[in-house]
């Protein structure tokens, strides 16, 4: 009996509490969803916003995914799941604007015999300088009889070196503004040392694209030392190795200059072997800017192929014989063959 009475009292209190909640607009559950009673007391139940929890963004927060973006992403996923992919843009690429303007009208840089071309004569105590450029390949060509067995590059990250064949190597720089060294070990025992430097596409001077290296060969030296003509007796050893026909070497050339300052570009000696003409600057090679060589034909200066050889590039070789004009800026030097006196014939 007591239990029945207690149950009736609890039920009455519960009903009273619910009625009080309706009058004051307190939260209650309707159909399993949180709702609120209208403040007007008209019995309408209004939706209640979802309660917020600390640390989680709400529906109106800035970190919530915008509805348009969410809708577009859902639409793209739905299209691609059915094989409907967007078209790929294949319009032509834009120009990069990285042309090296110094190649528009190329001029040989210091030490180059022609724009982008360098000639060296290997010596044991000589390091050959090479200027490379990003997005271009520089080719190193050693003597035809040489074979390289090993090579080492100081910075393989910036400078990529590839062996094309036994005596030919390709060097490419990946970045500008760096330098390193390269050592090539030949079967002859020669070690070819290079100092390599990388420049950018906007360099004001053309870089080295072809580097030719010549070196005395043991067999050539043995053949050359068998007989030495009187004309060769006064020649330095490196000059004796350069000439094509040592027995025909002649020193009957004289230099002329109009002004004393023109003598700054004059070589120490000039000689020819019937095939090429050699302008030897000797110890002054490191301080003299190499002039441009012109051959005088019928009184007119004509361009002639020339290259720098010898230790430290001390000998300028013109691939012709006759009279020449050497020009460097405003300085001019003339080289003329002396006339053969009567009775001497063609004596050397």
Image: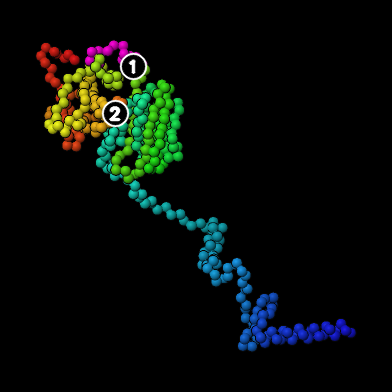
Q: Residue at x 37, y 25 (%)?
A: 124
> Seen in the image, is 69 located left or right of residue 122?
right
Q: Nearer the viewer, residue 333 or 17?
A: 333
Can residue 14 be seen here?
yes
Q: Residue at x 53, y 61 (%)?
A: 76
- In the rendered image, residue 17, in percent from the top left (x then y), is placed at 73, 84
* Quarter occupied by residue 158: top left
> Seen in the image, is 28 located left or right of residue 169?
right
Q: Is residue 228 magenta?
A: yes
- In the rendered image, residue 57, in percent from the top left (x then y), is placed at 58, 68
For the stretch drawn in magenta, what is the main secondary structure? helix
Crowding near pointer 2: few (<14 within 10 Å), some, many (20+)? many
In this rendering, the label closer to the viewer, 1 or 2: 2
- In the rendered image, residue 29, in percent from the top left (x then y), is placed at 69, 78
Q: Is residue 163 magenta?
A: no
- How many numbered discs sit on the rendered protein? 2
Give, as a single range, the part of the protein colored magenta.
Answer: 219-232
Can residue 247 be seen here?
no
Q: Work out which quarter of the rendered image holds the C terminus and state it.
A: top left
Q: Are marks 1 and 2 in contact (CB under 8 Å)?
A: no
How is the structure coloured here? rainbow
Residue of label 2: 313
Q: Nearer the viewer, residue 295 or 183?
A: 183
For the residues labelled 1 and 2, the Cα–Cα distance comes to: 20 Å
- In the rendered image, residue 194, in percent from the top left (x then y), is placed at 38, 32
* Quarter occupied by residue 246: top left
Instruction: Return the mark for residue 221.
Output: 1
């Amino acid at each position: 009996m007591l239990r029945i009475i207690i149950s009736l009292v609890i039920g009455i209190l519960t009903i009273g509490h619910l009625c009080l909640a309706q009058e004051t607009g307190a939260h209650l559950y309707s159909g399993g969803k949180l709702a609120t009673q209208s403040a007007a007391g008209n019995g309408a139940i209004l939706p209640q916003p979802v309660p917020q929890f600390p640390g989680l963004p709400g529906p109106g927060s800035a970190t919530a995914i915008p509805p348009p973006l969410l809708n577009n992403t859902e639409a793209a996923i739905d299209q691609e799941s059915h094989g409907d992919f967007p078209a790929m843009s294949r319009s032509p690429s834009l120009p990069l604007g990285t042309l090296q303007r110094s190649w528009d009208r190329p001029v040989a840089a210091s030490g180059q015999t022609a724009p982008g071309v360098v000639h060296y004569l290997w010596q044991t105590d000589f390091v050959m300088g090479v200027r490379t450029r990003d997005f271009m390949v520089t080719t190193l060509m050693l003597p035809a009889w040489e074979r390289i067995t090993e090579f080492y590059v100081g910075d393989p990250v910036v400078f990529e070196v590839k062996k094309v064949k036994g005596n030919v190597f390709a060097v490419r720089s990946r970045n500008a503004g760096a330098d390193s060294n390269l050592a090539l070990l030949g079967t002859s025992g020669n070690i070819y040392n290079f100092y390599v430097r990388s420049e950018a596409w906007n360099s004001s001077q053309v870089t080295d694209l072809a580097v030719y290296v010549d070196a005395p060969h043991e067999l050539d030296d043995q053949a050359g030392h068998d007989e030495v003509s009187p004309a060769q007796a006064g020649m330095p050893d490196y000059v004796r190795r350069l000439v094509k026909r040592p027995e025909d070497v002649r020193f009957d050339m004289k230099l002329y200059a109009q002004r004393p300052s023109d003598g700054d570009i004059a070589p120490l000696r000039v000689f020819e072997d019937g095939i090429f003409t050699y302008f030897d600057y000797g110890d002054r090679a490191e301080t003299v800017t190499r002039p441009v060589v012109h051959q005088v034909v019928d009184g007119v200066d004509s361009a002639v192929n020339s290259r720098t050889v010898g230790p430290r590039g001390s000998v300028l070789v013109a691939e012709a014989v006759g009279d020449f004009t050497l020009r460097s800026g405003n300085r001019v030097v003339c080289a003329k063959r002396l006339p053969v006196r009567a009775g001497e014939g063609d004596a050397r």
